[in-house]
Image (cartoon, grey):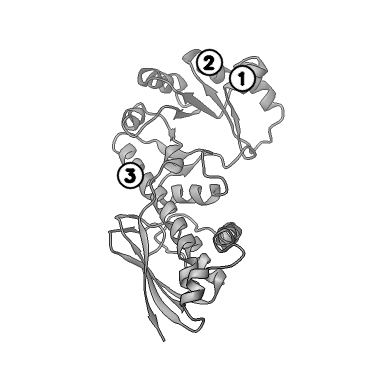
Amino acid sequence: MTTPDADPRLPIAPLDTIQYEALVRQELAVDLGSAGDITTNAIVGSDVTAHARIVMRQDGRVCGLGPALCAFFLLGPVRHKPLESDGADVTAGTTIVELQGAARVLLSAERTALNLLGHLSGIATLTRAVVETVAEVGHARVVCTRKTTPGLRALEKYAVRVGGGSNHRFGLHDAVLIKDNHREIAGGVGPAIEAARATLGHLVALEIEVDTLEQLDEALTAGVDVVLLDNMPIADLTRAVAMTGGRAITEASGGITPDTIRQVAATGVDVISVGWITHSAPALDVGLDFSASA
């Protein structure tokens, strides 16, 4: 199975096939079930070949070409000619890849391929728009959260990077984030930080969520790498950035909407984390147009 070559213009590394092949295989298995594509198999002969084009029906940023093509490759040999690549900004009507292979393969893999491509392109497109908005008024990085579709976390976080955003932690295992319930159980900000510090390796970052400026002061006194300023009003966010004074990375999170994110960015926070760039991004309309040939 071959994958599309990486575009040197894409500032991040593309995903390796091993990171999505099992997911694509599972999606195909769900669609094909125990009897296969009974419509296509009844109408289209096994010897019929076809030329096809994947076309973007909306303006947007391309993302997910690798997983989309994987759906075709898993069902049979398909020749492909990429005309665009992940990270490309295209207009409606743009052909992003040409395909040639058995018509049965192209038809049976169509929905799985387009579902993935449309969903990931939608995330990349929304992320691009949010990043551009934030850049107009501040220096903050826009990051996604763990609010991802079950099974799609690696792909959705990749789409955020393609859109120009960054990733928060990938799971519970790669960074410490002390949240309000952790603080409650530990007995406060200081005890929670002390307990976490006692077990951390030297490469593991420590972040704590704070709801008030008083909690922020405690966290800075105890020493942390990142402070998550949760659901703070704009005035408090501005004061929190000043209080922190570079002693920790400041992250704004909670209650941030497309209408308020400019104000949040203008406070001077270093990071803005929002879940809706993954869980609520509208899919881009993507289509497969083909013509049969002998």
Tell me which label, 1 or 2, sits earlier in the chain: 1
Q: Nearer the viewer, residue 218 or 283?
A: 283
Tell me which label, 1 or 3, sits earlier in the chain: 3
Tell me which label, 3 or 2, sits earlier in the chain: 3
Q: Amino acid at mark 1?
A: Arg
Q: How many marks?
A: 3
Residue at x 42%, y 41% (from the top left corner): 280
Instruction: Please tell me whether residue 172 is drawn above or below residue 98 in the rendered image.
Output: above
Q: Secondary structure at mark 1?
A: helix
Do the CB atoms of the residues marked 1 and 2 lie less than 8 Å apart? yes
Q: Residue furthest top?
A: 214
Disc 1: CA contacts within 10 A as few (<14), some (14-19) or many (>=20): some
**Which label is found at residue 129?**
3
Instruction: Please tell me whether residue 239 is drawn above or below residue 137 in the rendered image.
Output: above
**Which label is found at residue 215?**
2
Q: Secondary structure at mark 3?
A: helix
- Which residue is identified by label 1? 183
